[in-house]
Structure formats: C-alpha cells, structure tokens
Image (cartoon, rainbow, N blue to C red):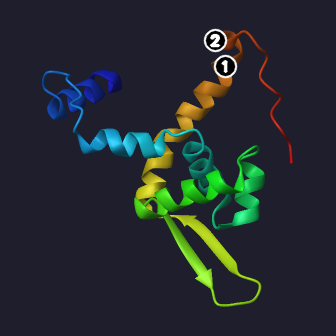
Amino acid sequence: MKVSHEVSALRQRFPDLVFEAGCPSRVLLDHVMSKWSPLVLLALAEGGTLRWSELRRRAEGVSEKMLAQTLRTLVDDGLVAREAHPVVPPHVDYALTPLGRELTDLLSPLMVWAFDHAGAILGVEPPPARRD
C-alpha cells in the first residue's frame, strides 16, 4: 500500500516522528508551501516557460512585490530557472527545473484535492472550473 510506504519513508528520516526546529526541510517547506509558491509552481507545470505577466495573471491576486519575492526564492532554491534575454524592453522567462518538476508532480494531486474539498471544508462553493 502506498500510504504505508510513505509513512515508513517518513519514519526513516524522522524515526521518532519529531520534526526538529533546526531541520532544513522545515525551511524548504516554508518556501514551497507559502501562499503563492504552489500557485506559481503549478502555473509553470501546466504552462511550460512563462513570462512575468503570464505568471501574474495565472496566480490571480498576487502583488508584484510578492510575485518577485516568490520567484526569487524559488530560483534561489533551484526549483525555477530564470532566463533574462538582453533586449529592450526586458524579457525574462521562467520555467521549472527538473527538481521543480519533481515537486509539482507531488503538488498537483494536493491542489486537486484542495479544489475538490474546499467547499465542504470551508462551507462555501468553489468557483466553477475555468475553460480559457
């Protein structure tokens, strides 16, 4: 069973299931599970290489400051690649790295689960799926 395998993998890393305050995994979790990181990562997973404006459109509601901060963190962590083209006006592309792709493969089912259960858990109806 997959769940028991994942639990044993967790126990291999945390034998007492104590998640120590100084563990680097907690810092990484903070980066990838922030308010905007999952949305940016999943937008890149579905959209391939995207420019700033397209990322901002897909992560509806994110401010320029928060998008810049989120992208900087994800680039620094090696999850997103940033390619600046030497043209005027500036043209910067963002894409997932192989490590980022591995992460989004795990995040996608979580996002589907959240969408499917948000209404019941929060007592509201989720917005209908968009057909752009």
Q: Is residue 7 above or below residue 51?
A: above
In the picture of the structure, the residue carrying the numbered disc 1 is 118
**Residue at point 79% right, 17% down?**
125
Residue displayed at 67% across by 27% down: 115
Q: Which residue is denoted by mark 2 in the rendering?
A: 121
Instruction: Identify the residue shown where x is 48% and y is 39%.
Output: 33
Mark 1: give few (<14), some (14-19) or many (20+) Cα within 10 Å.
some
Q: Position of residue 54 (x, y in %)?
A: 75, 60
Location of residue 119 with respect to 128 vertically, above or below:
above
- Front residue of 110/73: it is 73
59 up-or-down from 17: above or below: below
Question: Where 57 falls versus 24 (above or below)?
Answer: below
Q: Residue at x 22, y 38 (%)?
A: 22
SS label for mark 2: helix
Q: Percent from the top left, x then y, of residue 56?
A: 73, 55
Q: Position of residue 3 (x, y in %)?
A: 34, 23
Residue type (three-letter) at the residue carrying disc 2: Ile
* Structural distance between the alpha carbons of marks 1 and 2: 5 Å
**Mark 2, other Cα within 10 Å: few <14 / some 14–19 / many ≥20:** few
Q: Are marks 1 and 2 in contact (CB under 8 Å)?
A: yes
Rendering coords of residue 47 (x, y %): 68, 58
**Residue 7 in which image quadrant:** top left
From the viewer's perspective, is 89 left or right of 122?
A: right
Of the residues shown, which amino acid type is indicated by label 1?
A: Ala
Provide the secondary structure element on which disc 1 rests: helix
